[in-house]
Image (cartoon, rainbow, N blue to C red):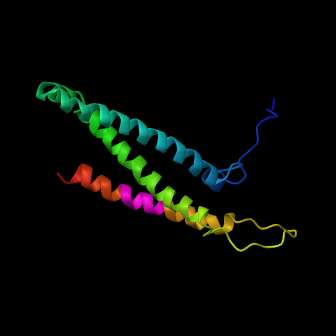
Amino acid sequence: MSDTKHHPNRLGLWGWLGGGRWGMERYLYALHRVTGLGLLAYFLLHIVVTSSRAFGADRWKTAMDAVTGPLFKFGEYLVFVAFAFHAANGIRLALLELGFAVGEPIEPVYPYRTSVHVQRPLAIGALALAAVLVAIGTASMWLVD
């Protein structure tokens, strides 16, 4: 008995990497929002831990002991990865908002052209920049002590 709702992936690996129906830019948008919220949560935690210094050396030591260990070191690494992506994608978004990489306005005549062909290289460049930053940060955080 065949499943009538099953649709084979005829696009192969590109169907997965290209974003499918949403498109890669939509996934970058969602990830930008998630990393922004994660960085906000880290910032608030950082303020709470740092403000314990105002209550004396014992509270400071207790707070710092609570946020040490391999789990928090990995968490700091994730914060750096989120920062690298958020910064690189933010530069891409700023360039788009300023009108760069939008493409020249054209008359809407079939076959329609979208600005995705102009924006996609910028998105790939932002991901490459984030990957370079993550590689440098990984080497700095885990390999050099």
Relative to residue 7, is residue 90 depicted above or below? below
Residue lying farthest to the left in this orientation: 57
Prevailing secondary structure class for the magenta stretch in the rendered image: helix
Q: How many marks?
A: 0
- Find out whether residue 119 is within the magenta segment: no
Which quarter of the figure is the N terminus placed in?
top right
Q: Nearer the viewer, residue 129 or 17?
A: 129
Answer with left or right where residue 31 lies relative to residue 135: right
The residue under the point 51% across, 65% down is 125
Q: Position of residue 41 (x, y in %)?
A: 41, 35
The residue under the point 21% across, 28% down is 63
Relative to residue 135, is residue 33 depicted above or below? above
Residue lying farthest to the right in this orientation: 110
Answer with left or right where residue 41 lies relative to residue 145: right
Please state the extent of the stretch shown in magenta in the rendering: 127-134
Relative to residue 42, is residue 105 depicted above or below? below
Answer with left or right where residue 47 lies relative to residue 116: left
Please identify the quarter of the rendering in which residue 104 is found: bottom right
Q: Position of residue 30 (x, y in %)?
A: 58, 45
Query: Is residue 131 visible in the rendered structure shown here?
Result: yes
Q: Nearer the viewer, residue 5 or 100?
A: 100
Q: Position of residue 29 (x, y in %)?
A: 58, 49
Q: Position of residue 136 (x, y in %)?
A: 32, 59
The residue under the point 66% across, 67% down is 102
Q: Nearer the viewer, residue 143 or 97?
A: 97
Query: Is residue 64 visible in the rendered structure shown here?
Result: no
